[in-house]
Amino acid sequence: MIEVFPAIQDLARRILAVEAARVRAVGTPVDEAVRACGKLQVPLSRFTGPAGFLSLLTRALVLAKAEVPALKVVQVGSDGNLAGFDELKHDQDAGELARGRVVLLAHLLGLLATLIGESLTLRLAHDAWPDVSIDKTDLKEEEES
Amino acid sequence: MSTQDKVIIRKLPTGVPGLDEILGGGLPEFSFNIIAGAPGSGKTTLAHQIMFANATPERPAIYFTVLGEPAIKMLRYQQQYTFFDHAKLNTAIRFINLSHVVLEKDLDAVMAEIVTEVEAANPALVFVDSFRTVVRKAQGVTSDVELQGFIQRLALHLASWQATTFLIGEYVEGEIQNNPVFTVADGLLWLSQQIERNSIVRKLQIVKLRGQGSVPGLHTVRISEEGLQAFPRTFGLTGKGEKPDGQRRLSTGIAKFDELLHGGIPEGDSMLMSGPSGSGKSILATQFIAEGIAKGEPGIVAIFEEMPDQYVRRATSFGFDFDTPQKNGQLEIIYLRPLDLSVDETVHEIVAKVKKIGAKRLVIDSLAGFEMALAPDFRTDFRESLYRMIGALTRMGVTIISTVEIEDAFTSMNLSNFVISFLADDIVRLRYVSINGQLRRMLLVVKMRGGPHSIDMTEYQITDKGIVIGEPLRGYRGLITGIPGPWNVESAQIQDPPVESAT
């Protein structure tokens, strides 16, 4: 199993909290994990192409499923959108669902950090969520300490 | 039209050391350029260097990627170079993937996508990597005329939007002729790799550059962690300096040798010091450098056959302190033995040091070692390269002694194993001679372009103080064969009394 650093998980958790607040404020039925991945889809597709984003998200989902088996109902559509979270909401308890969201987003961010580096990943995240404090996040701080 | 009327074309810096000089000052602003070459020749790295050197948040760069190296991998690898500035991404530099448009749609859609992005971002620089892929896709369904029309519209649109454009593509030699891309382009930068035996040499050629004079020919390129570095064939000395008139003489530090030279080595001359192993060439050159330091004339020693600390130790054994002048900027010892060295890189290094310490004297010890350090590809051009190198350095006012080892034949006297004697203003030949059962040393000033010199064949010795010049060898015949015999009375009368050469 490929694990992501706790700092990345923490970043994913904070991003999802922001998205959850927006879901509640707007009253949208779209899951916060779907919204978060969707927000990364735009900038990532611009430079990796839609196919590049699809590959990254699919890989992140495979890694997340290995950690949180409950995610098995989640799929990546050919358009790069996530499907299956509505089903999860009915079948899983809130804690497992929340963990699944965090692990999925953390794997997506972790993949990016592995491929293009921490600095560029944080920059992408910052552009997508300017209100999330991530400037001083060290994605590998746990590993180094 | 007067020079005041013509349009001023601003030149953009490339960010590649040496390349601006090759281009004739930089890249013409708003030009439409091709960066071409085989895979692995450094095209993308060159493009990135240009991009990072010029992109700003106000006038950003757009880098379109098309079916070549995926952008995510491009970013992964390119950020290893020191020129890569993370802070510029998504502010001054934007990567946009066009692969899906090229794959799924036609040239008009590609054009529309580029136009949309360019009009939105107002970029100063636009890159399409790889443009070859766009052309390949189009060639299946589009005529050459339509393709040329597309490229021309693209060039016109990007120039109208005041963007300097670079199309990057994998091309091989022979594709230049009748290629619509090359026809439309203002500039064509061609990168190549030449393989000979086990060595690889990277070269750059400005095949075409409208509106300004570039330096013709193939220029050596090296890729390091700092990106590309180009070594112009002009050594960065275009149009600079005149060789000194040679009126001033530089002492070699050996008074009697100076006498043989009629006052020392003319300033700005290149002297070839040839002789067999152990004949004292390096010692004599060391004394020349030591004398310069003593007189406040900084010196450079380029060595190829021993390490700098060994060289310093050897100088110390003759009573010369080479440590202190290195510390106080009067002496630089350059040891160059990278793989596949080029003459241009060597001269670049020497010129940089000459400028740094204001060197007046240079020793190259030895030319044979220098040649051995070169990539095989460069050895074939060694004479031509030396000619350019010596010309460039002497124009900087540097006086050069180059040592060259030759095998002593005992029936004749070669000046050098290299056919390079014509490059030298002055030639001194050291050799062994067999006299009375002893192997003794003699030297002879063969040539001095700047004036008369002694024509004596003079004995010398190597002592713990260096070279000590003795007396002319008289009373022998056949000294230049190394196996002289006694001069008979009749011949001796004919020989006397000339003591000086004509120029």
Image (cartoon, coloured by chain):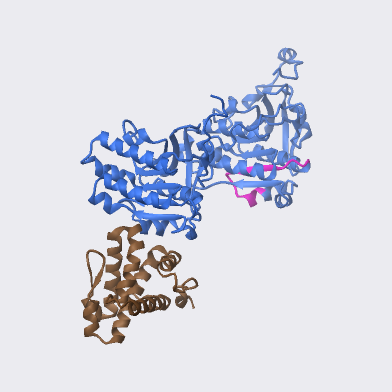
Chain colours: A brown, B blue
Residue B105 placement (x, y as % from top left): 24, 49
Residue B59 lies in the magenta-colored region: no
Compare residues A138 and A44 and report the one nearer the observer.
A44
Splitting the image into 4 quarters, where does residue A95 fall? bottom left
Of residues B264 and B441, the one nearer the viewer is B264
Q: How many marks?
A: 0
User: Between residues B13 and B5, which one lies in front from this camera angle?
Assistant: B5
Q: In this view, does B86 lie to the left or right of B38?
A: right
What's drawn in magenta, residue-wise?
B295-311
Q: Quadrant of the C terminus of chain B?
A: top right
Give how far across and how far down residue A108 sits, in percent.
34, 70
Residue B410 visible at all:
no
Name the residue furthest front.
A26
Q: Can residue B476 be seen in this view?
A: yes
User: What residue lies at 30% left-to-right and 36% top-to-bottom?
Assistant: B149
Q: Which residue is drawn at 59% across and 39% down?
A: B366
Task: Judge whether B442 appears above or below B85 on screen.
Answer: above
Left or right of B413 in this view: B489: right
Percent of width and height locating residue B199:
43, 44
